[in-house]
Image (tube, grey):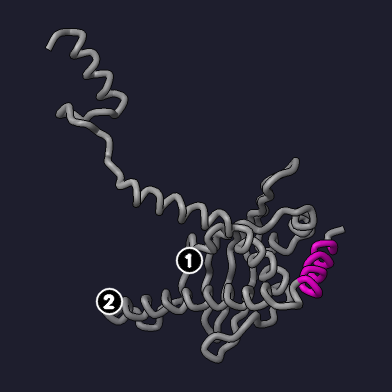
Amino acid sequence: MNARAQAQAEARFLKGETGVDGASGKVEVDPEVAEQAKAKEALYRGRAWLGREALCWILMKSESAEPLCKVDGQPLRVVFTGKILLRAGSGEVTEVAAKGVSAPYASIVRFALARNLLVHGARLQLTHGEQSFEVTLDAERFDLRAGKLPALLNEGDEGEELVERLELVSRLGRLIDALLAQFIKVRVGPQWEKSVVPELKAWFAQAD
């Protein structure tokens, strides 16, 4: 290999176009799989507003500490704790983050909500019966980013611990699904525009 060819080969290697053996370093992706991934991403992004509306509604309803719904016959209570992130699609301010135990219910958060920012992510405490879970939810996919399970009852036995942990994870998933289902029920109902939206706006305005 002459000097020029060697230099070209080294350049392609440094750009990641080839591997150490000189073969192509690019990973071939099935076009159909790539299109499906793009469509799924677009679907999630197109529905991101729904998750943000859900978190805003849950935030307002949770301030009273009353149960938002029942799961397996037991009340589910929700409290926002710690950090809360708000975002808007446009405007002078497009993102606001607040930290603190009671930050989600602070006047500054309501002030931002009243100016068309919506909850994008938040830390929640879910109390179901005598058990409490903590989760960080992302509105874009209403996805669980982080979670903390209740203390295990069967500590010491690895097998029983694993079974109990899996049961708690499954229950947490059902609690989150129940919250979203409750919101959807309200969102598609006739009272959304008539009473719920005015209630949200009035709650936001309490920051003034």
The CA span between labels 1 and 2 is: 21 Å
Q: Nearer the viewer, mark 1 or mark 2?
A: 1
Determine the residue positioned at 63% across, 54% down: 85
Side (left or right) of 5 relative to 95: left
The answer to whether residue 12 of the structure is visible from this angle is: yes
Residue 115 drawn at (x, y percent): 78, 53
Q: Nearer the viewer, residue 130 or 185?
A: 185
The answer to whether residue 136 of the structure is visible from this angle is: no
Residue matched to label 1? 147
Instruction: Indicate whether 135 appears above or below 31.
Output: below
Q: Residues within 10 Å of mark 1 (few under 14, many from 20)?
A: some
Residue 58 drawn at (x, y percent): 66, 70
Residue 76 drawn at (x, y percent): 59, 81
Is the stretch drawn in magenta largely helix, strand or loop?
A: helix
Q: Mark 1 or 2 closer to N-term?
A: 1
The quarter of the rendered structure image containing the N terminus is: top left
Per the image, label 2 sits on a secondary structure element best described as: helix
- Give the residue type that dot 1 points to: Gly
In the image as oriented, which residue stretches furthest toward the left? 1
Per the image, label 1 sits on a secondary structure element best described as: strand
Determine the residue positioned at 64% across, 78% down: 185
The quarter of the rendered structure image containing the C terminus is: bottom right
Does the magenta-highlighted stretch encompass residue 185?
Answer: no
Determine the residue positioned at 24% across, 15% down: 8
Does the magenta-highlighted stretch encompass residue 200?
Answer: yes
Which region is colored magenta? 193-206
Instruction: Indicate whether 117 appears above or below 161.
Output: above
- Give the residue type that dot 2 points to: Glu
Question: Which label belongs to residue 158?
Answer: 2
